[in-house]
Image (spheres, helix red, strand yellow):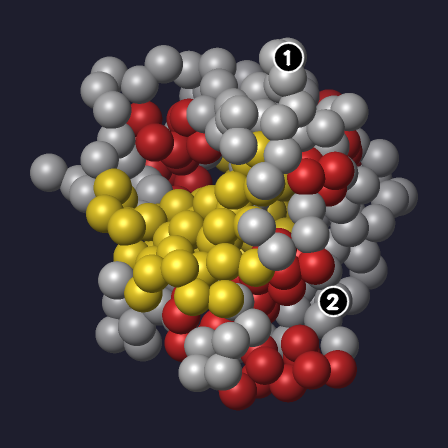
Amino acid sequence: MRSLLPIAAEGVDLEASYAVAADVPWHVRVSFISSADGAVTVDGRAGGLGSAGDRRVFALLRDLSDVIVVGAGTARAEGYAAPRPTGRRLDRRRRHGLPDAPTLALVSERLAFDPEGGLFPDDEPRTVVITSGASPPERRAEVARHADVLVCGAAAVDLVAAAAALRDRGLSRVHCEGGPQLFATALRARVVDELCLTLAPLLTGPGADRIVAGVGLPAPAQMVLDHVLEEDGYLFLRYQLLHS
């Protein structure tokens, strides 16, 4: 374990610190930022908790992924658009043998999207929408004009089936960006391999969600700490989940 090293210190290679071994065939990484008292948002957005170091790590995690998976509510709240890296970030993806841009995969039951928005670009890679058979058929047909729609599960999204569908598409490095209810569902489905958690030196008070919300877990998920990095009081924690 690498412990309490400044994130920008000489000898700290961030890419090496967060890289997934090439011989790992499939990997699901979840990332969150949380205040010291457990809040995942300030005024409804995670961005209010962040720092320059957190944005740097978040960008790196995206750049090391084939696909970015996010719940539709989080995408709307945080003003998401399909990522299109340029400059040094594009160079980094190419060095790691990744496509020029990661695929954006949106998880949604209601499909309440603006098809003309930035979530659905005209160029490649095409956005993927993961939904269930219970979603409105007319909305599925509309969204399918702008994205690849994957129906995974009958009454609700089945994340095991969704993971298999992404893997079948050659998307083997998954970066899940929440929100908390999607993370809870993924933990219950036992599809999460890693959690990268930024701990912000802030106290926000009661009211905000934690990183796991909504669906209860049958038992606490066990993790092993891989590293701790630090910058400006922010702690950058990388955990591996244990699956018995």
SS of the residue under disc 2: loop
User: Mark number for residue 148?
Assistant: none
Mark 2 vs mark 1: give the one in front.
1
Identify which amino acid the numbered label 2 is placed on.
Arg
Q: Which residue is mark 2?
A: 84
Residue at (35% x, 68% y) in the render? 20
SS of the residue under disc 1: loop
For the residue pair 70 and 128, the one nearer the viewer reads as: 70
Identify which amino acid the numbered label 1 is placed on.
Gly
In the figure, residue 158 lies in which quadrant? Answer: top left
Indicate the position of residue 200 as horizontal and vertical percent values: 58, 41
Which quarter of the rendered picture does the N terminus lie within?
Answer: bottom left
Taking the image as shown, residue 229 lies to the left or right of residue 102, namely: left
Residue at (73% x, 41% y) in the render? 47
Indicate the position of residue 83 as horizontal and vertical percent values: 72, 60
Taking the image as shown, residue 179 lies to the left or right of residue 163, namely: right
Indicate the position of residue 222 as horizontal and vertical percent values: 22, 35
Which quarter of the rendered picture does the C terminus lie within?
Answer: top left
Residue at (52% x, 67% y) in the render? 7
* Residue 51 visible in rendering: yes
Residue at (43% x, 66% y) in the render? 5
For the residue pair 191 and 199, the one nearer the viewer reads as: 199
Placement of 95 over or under 235, stated as above or below = below
For the residue pair 78 and 224, the one nearer the viewer reads as: 224
* Residue 108 visible in rendering: no
For the residue pair 117 and 86, the one nearer the viewer reads as: 86
Disc 2 or 1, which lies upstream in sequence?
Answer: 2
Q: CA distance from mark 2 to mark 1?
A: 34 Å
Taking the image as shown, residue 121 lies to the left or right of residue 46, namely: right
Q: Which residue is mark 1?
A: 207
